[in-house]
Image (cartoon, helix red, strand yellow):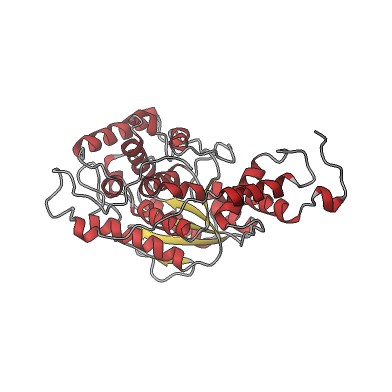
Amino acid sequence: MRHIPSDTSACATGASTRAPDHWNPLKANMQIPHIAPTHNNELGARLDQAINNKTKPLGSLGRLESLARQIGLIQQRCDVALTPATILVFAADHGVVAEGISAYPQDVTWQMVENYLAGGAAINVFAKQHNCALQIIDAGVNHEFGARAGLTDRKVRANGTRNFAQEAAMSAAECAEALQRGMALVDELDGNLIGFGEMGIGNTTAAAALMHKLTGVAVADCVGAGTGLNSAGILRKQQVIERAVALHADAQQPLEVLATFGGLEIAMMVGAMLRAAERRMVLLIDGFITSSALLVAARLQPAILDYCVFSHCSDENGHTRMLQALEAQPLLHLDLRLGEGTGAALALPLLYSAVNFLREMATFESAQVSEQSA
């Protein structure tokens, strides 16, 4: 298991830059799900034997073999099975957009949600292609959609987060509410395979700030083009984050960092990821923003990483370093940087292939094939 320091405390007392009543730890007093490591020597040996006895040279299915083993350890059995996946796409707006850190206006968030609901986005295409259920969650979009088929309203703040370049993005209570609503969403799901995606203009800025605070990687190495910034725009984003980090220098604990710099969709993902791992589901992680949510979750419960499959390494600057911090090995390298859970959807066939070879492939004995000689 990977060794990432944990901190299961509730949101801690905050920086002196905030109003005294803005950060009340009592309002954020909540139970973080406990996640058990999957390591099991006896089961691991049985899985290795089952994999190695298939009609193939040892190790010849490469990453599919380690995937099958991981899924077996998650499910605590050798006769592994995956249900059809559900991908949750969390959407929210970010107050930091007021600092000019995005190539697109904030309205694109709600417009893209409408696109999802109409079935016109890339994630709709890929989810349909791979027989994957898709759930769109309004975590805090600055728009009133009304009751809509296909949209789950879990809005925490009507207009999204505050501008963290000036004040904390969320209060402790709002952060806790987003986490709890994410957990509740997973409690409503059946199945054992869940993917995560997001939408929110400005959320690469929030993710880069989280990455810097939780890994210590320089801001310049965390910041990228996002929705398509030029070099001047990237520099502006970097400077905004650096000023915000200085303003909120006292924010150190994982949930405090999340509330100070994160987004409502990121916080809701953190809660959903924690609950999904507690329920021993397989977590399929998408790109840079989704990985930033996992980074927070892993600082709270390091064993969550045992349950995660990293779909791809995105083309967003910083994702490679973030994956290194998580000791993750992505399945795909396709130069994606769209988000929405698209990388997770594209990786689904690999997970099903890993499970199916373990379930259905003949053994040397059953196929009466000679095994490798010593």
Q: Quadrant of residue 178?
A: bottom left
Q: State whether residue 327 appears in this view.
A: yes
Q: State whether residue 285 appears in this view.
A: no
Q: What x and y, as percent, mark residue 366?
A: 84, 53
Q: What x and y, as percent, mark residue 194?
A: 52, 57
Of 96 and 357, which appears nearest the observer? 357
Q: What x and y, as percent, mark residue 199?
A: 43, 51
Of 241 and 44, which appears nearest the observer? 44
When the figure is inspected, residue 52 is found, relative to residue 118, above or below; the finding is: above
Query: Count of labels shown?
Result: 0
Q: Quadrant of residue 356?
A: bottom right
Of 336 and 191, which appears nearest the observer? 191
Q: Residue at x 52, y 58 (%)?
A: 281
When the figure is inspected, residue 32 is found, relative to residue 222, above or below; the finding is: below
Q: What x and y, as percent, mark residue 217?
A: 36, 31
Q: Residue at x 59, y 59 (%)?
A: 132
Extreme residue in the left direction:
20
When the figure is inspected, residue 103 is found, relative to residue 83, above or below; the finding is: above
Decide if residue 181 is on the left or right side of residue 367. Answer: left
Decide if residue 283 is on the left or right side of residue 14. Answer: right
Q: Residue at x 80, y 33 (%)?
A: 374
